[in-house]
């Protein structure tokens, strides 16, 4: 009977050690936030942050009021060399850097943006036309009525 419990015990240890640690989610460890805001109407978007794919072919439509989509990427620092990206459905770990390179496939346009955390941790995108986005960066959160 002891033979049966020993393998089970080791399987539990292995499973426990493979679990990812959940970070405390609060404003103090928010590394940066990306909001997709106004002007989107059934637009397709894919997003990579520092070469880490986080969104793949999502359809975006902005609400009339307050003029924002449901895509908000929350990126938290986990106290090590990684960021954790939360998009309501998944958590993705990516390399922690002060320079944020955003590669966006917007409809059929390939767009490249760079944000510097020293200039603010709030990033916003508004649609200009079917191939172009406006990029904003702020030290304070965007306000939506």
Image (cartoon, grey):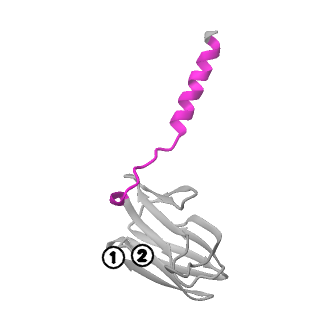
Name the outermost residue toward the bottom: 129
Q: Is residue 20 left or right of residue 120?
A: right
Reading the image, the residue beneath label 1 is 119
User: Is disc 2 surrounded by few (<14), some (14 to 19) or many (20+) residues within 10 Å?
Assistant: some
Residue 136 in picture, x, y percent from top left = 43, 81
Q: Is residue 74 left or right of residue 45?
A: left
Pick whichever, 113 or 126, lies toward us.
Answer: 126
Find the distance from the CA under tag 1 to the CA under tag 2. Answer: 8 Å
Q: Is residue 141 magenta?
A: no
Residue depicted at 37% across the width and 70% down the height: 121
Residue depicted at 40% across the width and 76% down the height: 142
Residue depicted at 43% across the width and 75% down the height: 123
Name the outermost residue toward the top: 1
For residue 21, the mark is none
User: Is disc 1 surrounded by few (<14), some (14 to 19) or many (20+) residues within 10 Å?
Assistant: few
Q: Tell me the magenta residue range.
A: 3-29
For residue 115, the mark is 2
Residue 35 in picture, x, y percent from top left = 48, 73
- The quarter of the image holding the C terminus is bottom left
In the displayed structure, would residue 117 be above or below residue 79?
A: below
Q: Is residue 10 magenta?
A: yes
Residue depicted at 57% across the width and 64% down the height: 54
Pick whichever, 57 or 72, lies toward us.
Answer: 72
């Amino acid at each position: 009977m002891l033979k049966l419990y020993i393998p089970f015990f080791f399987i539990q240890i292995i499973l426990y050690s493979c679990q990812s640690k959940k970070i405390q989610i609060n404003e103090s460890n928010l590394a940066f936030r990306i909001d997709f805001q106004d002007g989107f109407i059934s637009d397709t978007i894919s997003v990579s942050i520092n070469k880490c794919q986080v969104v793949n072919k999502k359809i975006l439509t902005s609400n009339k009021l307050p003029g924002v989509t449901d895509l908000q990427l929350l990126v938290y620092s986990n106290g090590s060399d990684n960021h954790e990206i939360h998009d309501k459905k998944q958590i993705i770990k990516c390399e922690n850097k002060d320079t944020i390179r955003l590669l966006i496939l917007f409809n059929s346009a390939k767009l490249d943006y760079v944000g510097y955390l020293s200039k603010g941790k709030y990033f916003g995108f508004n649609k200009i036309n079917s191939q172009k986005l406006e990029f904003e960066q702020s030290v304070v959160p965007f306000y939506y009525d």
